[in-house]
Amino acid sequence: MHISPMKKVLSVCLFILLMISALPFFITYVDRQYTGIDSLQSTLQKFEQIVPKSATVYYFSGDKDCAGITSGQNIIYPQSEYKTSFMIQFILAPRIVTIMNYQDIPPESFILIDQQKDSIVNTKRNTGQIFDSSDSLLSVCDGKYYFTLLKKKR
Amino acid sequence: MILIAVLLCILSFYILIDKHLSVGNVLLKLSLAYFFCFSLLSLLYICILFLGINFIVFQIILIIIPIIFLLNQIRKKAFRKPRIPDLSGLSFPLLIIIFLCILIFTVIFFLSTKRWGAGDAWQIWTLHAKFLVYKVEFANLFGKDMIFSHADYPLMLPGFIAMVWRSLGTFSSAVPMMVAYINGALLILMLFASFYEKKFTMLSVIVMAILTCPPVLFPYLSSQYSDTLLAVFILVTFILMEHIPEKKQGLSLFMIGFFSASCGWIKNEGLAFFVIFTLFFIIKHFRNINKIKFYLAGIVFPLLVVVIFKIVYAPSNDLIAGQSGNYLAKLFDVSRYITIMKFLINVTVALHCQMMYILLASILIINYRYFYSFSFAVIFILLTVYFFVYVFTPLNLNYHLYSSYDRLLHHVFPALMYTVFLSAAEKFKKKNVLMTS
């Protein structure tokens, strides 16, 4: 099939135009996905306004032995909490999100605790000490978890 | 504002390449200009962040300088007369195949990619980008308390994304996604363009069709990781090596230096590539100091930024910090070699590996001289370095192999494919098999 060079160039231009016009559709298709990050982000939105950008946030999962309060050991994060801590780090950036022994947290630091709604007994045992020695600043629920922002007392 | 600056910069570099490089292909010139700007803007953005320079001023300068350059070119009438791109080598059915390849690539990319990308994309690269948007708090990224954020990783991809985010004033997930799409698409198109430029028309279409197949470059291509960007820069370095003009080689050699050093600004593995490539480049051209001078001039800026970043800001790398000093014990530990070899045998079922072995076996039969070539030497030594990183790794060996081996192959696969196909094509050149459509 012989086609003149000009027609070939025109078909290339037409194809490029077609691709450019299709791109917004593709971008919207992916951009409208609702991921775990987006869900958590809408929950933690208010926290971002309270915690200064340069602050460090100490994160604990209330379902686990919080920073070794009962066992004296650092928590070993299973995959799901590990992922949540990364998500929180991503959402709260440029704030530093870190995990360490509760006893080592400096006074007046921000503490973020997640608690599963269904395991209040465990949560109370694990996080009781943290709640007792901190001021509660804000608590939000995303349906499955309570997220509480605390500030350690002096 | 930054998008206008990026477009103006690409246009300026396109004109510069058009004037000084003996490349006729519009697509190839455009791709080279894009990646040159990508690296340069990322480096400049990190510089202004480290130095505390105002971002608005930076954007204005980025717009003014290319405009002055373009106006100067217009005044001097230095533009080449626009010509219709030469598509004479392509028959219409081949053109349709190319369109189909691009369309298939696009559909697969957007169907397989995710908002915020795969795990490592948002846990490392996009996370770093988010820090780099803030003019003061970016330093938090390099604090010791961050959870496994790999803050020692170089910042080309995060730097570019952060620059666009800061200019747009929003953390849109479309930015890292489009960057990954453009990089992936240009990787394939650049391979096509380079073969087409060398008049291997049929081969250019075959290579494009192979690379569009989902298991070859995906899922890394759509993961939004930095690995594809590193694969592109390694490939660009080899493509430029194949397109050095006979006369006026200055800009070409400068760009080779710039792209090879830029690899070290993408990932730590890129630093290994840069060192090996530079070593071989100097050995190859040790009689021609002029060539080495132009090459070294190209590496100065990216290398300077990488060195400052590594010395001043980056925390120590986990592989280096975790070393307990028992190097000799690890070097002579046969069980480590057995574990690695067992793993290598097991992974040969992956298409990536099969294709690499088939490529190497085929070229051994078609043109065994490839194994003496500059490109093979660089790739082989790079893979050897990767091998010894596994031997000395402080991490669990099996975990380290499983989590990184595939992506290391992804870094070198496009460059290996390009150089193997080119070597085979040149062997067949006389027979004129691959040159006609």
Image (tube, coloured by chain):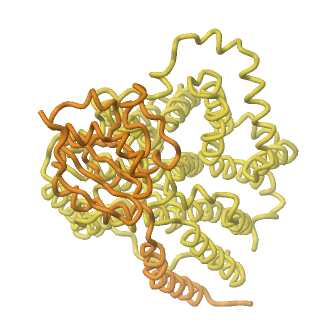
- Residue located at (45% from left, 75% from top): A27
Instruction: Please tell me which residue lies in front, B331 or B423.
Output: B331
Whether residue A93 is situated above or below residue B29 in the rendered picture: above
Whether residue A79 is situated above or below residue B205 in the rendered picture: above
Whether residue B160 is situated above or below residue A27 in the rendered picture: above
Residue B117 at x, y percent in the picture: 48, 60
Instruction: Please tell me which residue lies in front, B125 or B213.
Output: B125
Picture quadrant where residue B152 is located? top left
Query: Chain A takes which shade in the image?
Result: orange
- Residue located at (84% from left, 42% from top): B364
Task: Decide if residue B24 is in sight here.
Answer: no
Classify the position of the N terminus of chain A by image quarter: bottom right
Classify the position of the C terminus of chain A by image quarter: top left
- Residue located at (19% from left, 59% from top): B59
- Residue located at (31% from left, 55% from top): A147
Query: For this view, does B408 lie left or right of residue B114?
Result: right
In the displayed orientation, state which residue is furthest to the right.
B365
Residue A91 at x, y percent in the picture: 32, 55
Residue B384 at x, y percent in the picture: 66, 29
Query: For this view, does B103 lie left or right of residue B1?
Result: right
Which one of the lettered chains is coloured yellow? Answer: B
